[in-house]
């Protein structure tokens, strides 16, 4: 796989190298304000979101982006070629882009990313009239500390690649700091994965995977939405008329793997268009239609393979007086975990001036509670696009940490259990030294050392990349040669008078005892043990148990206890 690196403009690398090293938190509100075109604004600091009119200087209906600071205060916004600051003034240092692809369907063609509190990247797709490939991808860098806090573009319109379709989506890298920007070329099965790294570099590579993306009728590119689950594990994208594919995504490596697909009847009037996953990732919502037949909002269950048969019709658009139907636009998951739906019809007042909302997208079927004409935007007619936001709240990919358990003390000749229970099937364990261990590659080996020994545990979570999935811990087992008390590690509760109870010889008053099973679940505890466990009423299963004894003078010790019936 070829790796491409973008050379940064002189002076910019040093700025990025310093600022990108700052850890970003996950409780962030960069997507708090949405522009919908024609200066409509949704503010998600209230519930329901507040609608504002004439809130900016926008004059477009698609290809729109906006960005807040981490506290939800608007910083800048943009439309087809123009960038404005929070005071609705043209942004300092910005070069007007007359070629900006303002008709980028459902705004996937523009997105903005925070690098830290002051530095932001703005990515946009632009028409290239000199090329047979339809779209070029550019980026600009914005420093909000410049221009008295109003921001300044410090690097403008840097070309990354050309020959792309209009779909773009973004997923946080496994390190919780970097970003994956994902796009696709036309008329092939080649994804581009661009890594905006924490070291200030922009690297990218290509991967041929999945279905061939085809030109749509009367267009020069594939169009429709590309979107990701909130956890970044899956990506869905429109592939062709009536077809969507879902791929697994590795946040560590950027690798994509086919997972599922859906295939609707191939009709020019039935184009699958907008896409959004439910917050829990269980459902994929898709809009279909092109204004020539009843446009439909579907819900599909995200399972491996062909998911077409899981489709549930959530809503069909009504027929209007001029023999046309509404056209669906983008579906976008909001910061309140509701999905927003745009639809448009020149002869339908509600469709032109109201925004649809799926209020409970985690629920199956009609329980998702889709209200087609919910948020009133009158008198402004919205466009077909919504901002293209990633999940800003997705943090570092967390591993299951190694846990060697608490320190142990045993008498010479006794045994004790190390580690903690593991109910997963994806962990790899390695203990060293193996001396005195029965199973040094298990989560909870039994240790029988002849002298005081420190055991070191390495645990690997195989579900994530090695640099985030490997952790270490240690535990010391102290072997006492002068134990006054003696533990009898066998119980045979058969009533014959021999080893019927867990016995501690030379038992002192105030000795605390705890017994756990092999899963670490406590089955008995006494703060003043009387050599009476188990009592006659307790039905005890045969097997291996573990004791923990704390003598008032000698301190704590632990070991393995065998129950034989």
Image (cartoon, grey):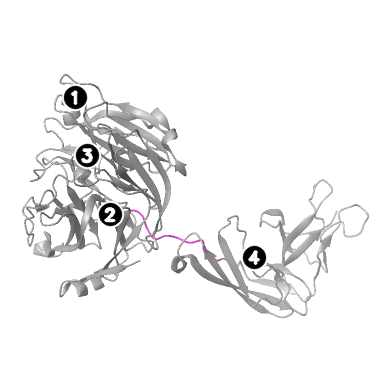
Q: Is residue 469 left or right of residue 225?
A: right
Q: Is residue 187 above or below residue 554?
A: above
Q: Which residues are magenta?
A: 393-402
Residue corresponding to mark 3: 217
Mark 1 and 3 residues: CB-CB less than 8 Å, in contact? no
Camera-near label (3 vs 4) is: 3
Residue 345 coordinates in the image, percent (x, y)? 17, 28
Residue corresponding to mark 2: 183
Residue at 73% across, 67% down: 559
Front residue of 469/294: it is: 294
Residue 123 coordinates in the image, percent (x, y)? 20, 57
The quadrant in which residue 144 appears is bottom left
Residue corresponding to mark 4: 442
Q: Is residue 441 left or right of residue 346?
A: right
> Which comes sooner in the sequence, label 3 or label 4?
3
The quadrant in which residue 330 appears is top left
SS under mark 3: loop
Residue at 64% across, 65% down: 442
Q: CA distance from mark 1 to mark 2?
A: 33 Å
The quadrant in which residue 205 appears is bottom left
> Which comes sooner in the sequence, label 3 or label 2?
2
Q: CA distance from mark 2 to mark 4?
A: 43 Å
SS under mark 4: loop
């Amino acid at each position: 796989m070829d790796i491409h690196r973008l050379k940064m403009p002189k002076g910019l690398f040093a700025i990025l190298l310093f600022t990108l090293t700052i850890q970003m938190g996950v409780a962030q509100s960069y997507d708090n304000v949405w522009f919908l075109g024609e200066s409509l604004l949704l503010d998600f600091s209230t519930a329901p979101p507040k609608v504002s009119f004439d809130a900016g200087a926008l004059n477009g209906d698609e290809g729109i982006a906006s960005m807040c600071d981490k506290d939800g205060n608007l910083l800048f916004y943009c439309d087809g070629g123009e960038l404005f600051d929070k005071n609705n003034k043209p942004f300092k240092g910005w070069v007007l882009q007359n070629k900006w692809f303002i008709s980028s369907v459902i705004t996937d063609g523009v997105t903005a990313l925070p690098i830290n509190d002051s530095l932001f990247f703005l990515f946009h797709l632009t028409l290239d009239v000199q090329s047979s490939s339809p779209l070029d991808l550019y980026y600009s860098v914005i420093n909000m500390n410049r221009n008295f806090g109003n921001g300044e573009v410090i690097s403008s319109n840097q070309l990354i690649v050309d020959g792309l379709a209009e779909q773009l989506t973004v997923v946080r890298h496994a390190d919780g700091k970097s970003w994956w920007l994902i796009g696709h070329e036309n008329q092939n099965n080649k994804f581009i994965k661009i890594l905006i790294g924490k070291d200030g570099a922009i690297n990218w590579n290509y991967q041929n995977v999945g279905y061939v993306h085809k030109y749509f009728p009367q267009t020069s590119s594939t169009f429709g939405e590309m979107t990701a689950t909130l956890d970044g594990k899956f990506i869905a994208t429109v592939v062709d008329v009536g077809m969507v594919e879902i791929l697994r995504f590795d946040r560590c490596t950027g690798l994509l793997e086919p997972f599922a697909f859906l295939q609707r009847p191939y009709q020019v009037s039935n184009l699958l268009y907008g896409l959004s996953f439910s917050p829990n990732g269980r459902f994929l919502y898709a809009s279909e239609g092109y204004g020539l037949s009843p446009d439909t909002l579907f819900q599909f269950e995200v399972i491996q393979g062909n998911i077409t048969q899981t489709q549930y019709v959530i809503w069909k658009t009504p027929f209007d007086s001029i023999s046309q139907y509404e056209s669906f636009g983008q579906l976008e998951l909001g910061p309140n975990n509701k999905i927003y739906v745009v639809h448009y019809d020149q002869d339908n007042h509600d469709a032109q001036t109201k925004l649809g909302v799926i209020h409970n997208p985690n629920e199956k079927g009609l329980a998702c509670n889709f209200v087609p004409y919910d948020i009133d935007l009158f008198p402004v007619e919205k466009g077909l696009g919504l901002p293209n936001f990633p999940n800003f709240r997705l943090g570092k990919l967390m591993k299951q940490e190694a846990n060697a358990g608490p320190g142990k003390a045993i008498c010479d000749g006794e045994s004790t259990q190390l580690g903690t229970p593991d109910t997963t099937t994806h962990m790899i364990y390695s203990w060293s030294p193996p001396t005195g261990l029965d199973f040094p590659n298990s989560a909870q080996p039994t240790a029988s050392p002849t002298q005081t020994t420190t055991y070191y545990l390495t645990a690997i979570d195989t579900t994530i990349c090695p640099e985030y999935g490997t952790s270490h811990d240690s535990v010391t087992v102290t072997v006492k040669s002068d134990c006054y008390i003696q533990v009898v590690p066998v119980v045979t509760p058969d009533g014959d008078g021999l080893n019927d109870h867990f016995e501690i010889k030379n038992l002192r008053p105030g000795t605390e005892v705890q017994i756990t099973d092999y899963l670490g679940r406590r089955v008995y505890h006494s703060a003043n043990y009387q050599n009476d466990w188990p009592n006659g009423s307790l039905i005890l299963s045969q097997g291996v148990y573990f004791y923990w004894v704390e003598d008032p003078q000698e301190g704590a010790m632990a070991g393995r206890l065998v129950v034989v019936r």
